[in-house]
Amino acid sequence: MSGKDNVTRSNAITGGLLGFLGVLGFSLSLPMTRVAVEHLDPWFVAFGRAVGAGALAMAYLVAVRAPRPTRAQWRRLAVVALGVVAGFPMFTSLALQTSTAAHGAVVVALLPAVTAGFAVLRAKERPAPAFWLAGGAGLLAVLTFVTLSGTVSGALGWADLFLLAAITLCGLGYAEGGALARDLGGARTICWALVLSLPFSILVTGVAALHHPPHAPLPAWGAFAYLTLISMFLGFVAWYSGLARGGVARVGQIQLAQPVLTLGWSAWLLHEHVATAALVAALFVLASVALTQRLRTRDAAPRGPVAVEARQGA
């Protein structure tokens, strides 16, 4: 096996592990949002966490003396910010005022397919046909599971439309951020996106706090802290690093495990009803994820910080 093949395999393994850490962190986002919006204004929850994460991001960038992005990179960072800093938190916060976290997991099951689609359009990746078959099988397993679990009921409502908007913008932000992280690295990508969004995030948070002063019990503030530190910051550091190393489309399929994890958290923490089909669905999902990780995806080679980290064996 050549040195190039060793580096490629190492990047794939490391990317998959980092991607899983990101998904594990994200899997609690919907339950934590549900807890937070029961007592806090949804606009405050959506943008207040971006303010806290933005402060952490600014401190990190100063500490590492990160160079400023180029003009072209700023434009791409704006796409990332629109998708994952503003769009997904805002629409999920609005949706989970009336929807359960378990129901939200139904729509989140579509996120890997959306991310893979944007990976083709934005990241210039070309997954093999077998990749789409494996990913489609995993998506079918998740949708079958959540349907049999009884989390799909009633007609399409505003909450569903909000969730669809959330995953569309999130898939765009994931694909753009994963591609950009090849040049900037995972940490700097999310940090610069947060800093770019900070003026708007502060404005919306301030207006929301004035209209609905934030008074909430400790569990709601704990959920808000989780959304700030993990969902909005550390989770994205791992996630974008994984996407950059292993490929947006391929690592993005690890998200297939997120709805199953989210339903588990919802049942355990929020006592929401989930049927016993979880184990069978989880096995199908894990098999699909394992297969997509073994299939090659033709994309651009890592550059910048990611390439340096790969050569150093990080």
Image (cartoon, rainbow, N blue to C red):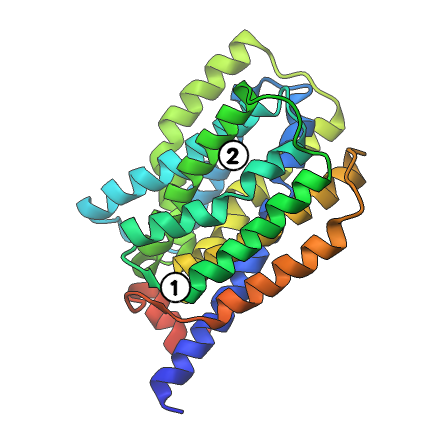
**Mark with earlier residue (2, 1):** 2
Callout in the foreground (2, 1): 1
Q: CA distance from mark 2 to mark 1?
A: 42 Å
| Residue occupying the far left of the picture | 71
Between residues 154 and 176, which one lies in front from this camera angle? 154
Q: Is residue 123 left or right of residue 247?
A: left
Please tell me the numbered disc located at residue 52. 2
Q: Is residue 2 above or below residue 249?
A: below
Q: Which residue type carries mark 2?
A: Gly
| Residue 27 found in image quarter | top right
Q: Is residue 299 above or below residue 186?
A: below
Residue 54 pos. (x, y %): 45, 37
Give the labeled residue for mark 1. 129
Residue 70 pos. (x, y %): 20, 49
Residue 98 pos. (x, y %): 64, 19
| Residue 245 found in image quarter | bottom left
Looking at the rendered image, the quarter that the N terminus falls into is bottom left
Task: Tell me, yes or no, if residue 295 can be seen here.
Answer: yes
Mark 2 crowd level (few <14, some 14–19, many ≥20, 10 Å Cα): many
> The residue tagged with tag 1: helix, strand or loop?
helix
Between residues 25 and 66, which one lies in front from this camera angle? 25
Residue 125 pos. (x, y %): 31, 60
> The residue tagged with tag 2: helix, strand or loop?
helix
State the residue at coordinates (41%, 56%): 186
Q: Is residue 199 left or right of residue 44?
A: left
State the residue at coordinates (52%, 30%): 163
Mark 1 crowd level (few <14, some 14–19, many ≥20, 10 Å Cα): few
Q: Which residue type carries mark 1?
A: Pro
Q: Is residue 75 left or right of residue 140?
A: left
State the residue at coordinates (34%, 71%): 308
| Residue occupying the far top of the picture | 211
Between residues 97 and 228, which one lies in front from this camera angle? 97
